Image (cartoon, helix red, strand yellow):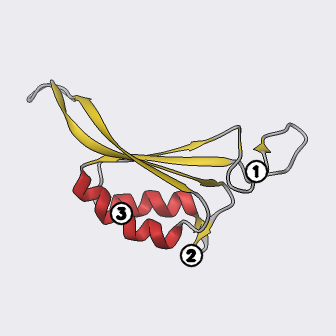
Amino acid sequence: MKLAGKARMLRIYFGEDDQWNGKPLYQAIVEKCRELDMAGATVLRGIAGYGASTLIHRAHLLSFSRDLPVMVSIVDAEEKIQKLLPFLDQAVGEGLIASSEVEVIKYMPPPGAPA
């Protein structure tokens, strides 16, 4: 079965070392998404990147740097995304949030099919 329609996508970019209330920021965002009953959130850790500081962060074999780029991607209905934004305003101290309208296609097993 296939469902399609319009949705909103948020991509939140920040550093791996960023924290919110004593826990990694990515973890706090994912937990808030779950609390708000959002469709899902995916955390991706980059191998290199830079932001406003223009300092390039990258993984090195002999480096102990842990502040690699992180992106959290969330796709859900506009109304659900709007409920998340006040939390992000508080939690994301330094970073970038990109928002865009997207067309989603969700594949699901037909009703009554074995899981």
* 28 and 103: which is toward the camera: 103
**Quadrant holding the N terminus:** top left
Q: Is residue 37 above or below residue 45?
A: below
Q: Which mark is residue 54?
A: 1
The mark closer to the camera, 2 or 3, is 3
Q: Residue at x 43, y 61 (%)?
A: 31
Q: Earlier in the sequence, mark 1 or mark 3?
A: 1
Q: Earlier in the sequence, mark 2 or mark 3?
A: 2
Residue 57: image location, x then y, percent: 77, 46
Q: Is residue 31 left or right of residue 101?
A: right
Label pair 2/3, CB-CB below 8 angstroms: no
Q: Amino acid at mark 1?
A: Thr
Extreme-left residue of the structure: 112
Q: Is residue 13 left or right of residue 61?
A: left
Spatial distance from mark 1 to mark 3, Cα to Cα?
28 Å
Residue 71: image location, x then y, percent: 55, 47
Q: Amino acid at mark 2?
A: Asn
Q: Is residue 24 left or right of residue 105?
A: right
Q: Earlier in the sequence, mark 2 or mark 1?
A: 2
Q: Residue at x 81, y 51 (%)?
A: 65
Q: Amino acid at mark 3?
A: Leu
Give the labeled residue for mark 3.
84
Instruction: Find numbered disc 1 in the image and state the secondary structure of the residue it sits on.
Output: loop
Q: Which mark is residue 21?
A: 2
Badge 1, how many Cα within 10 Å: few under 14, some, many 20+? few
The mark closer to the camera, 2 or 1, is 1
Residue 34: image location, x then y, percent: 35, 58
Badge 2, how many Cα within 10 Å: few under 14, some, many 20+? few
Spatial distance from mark 2 to mark 3, Cα to Cα?
17 Å
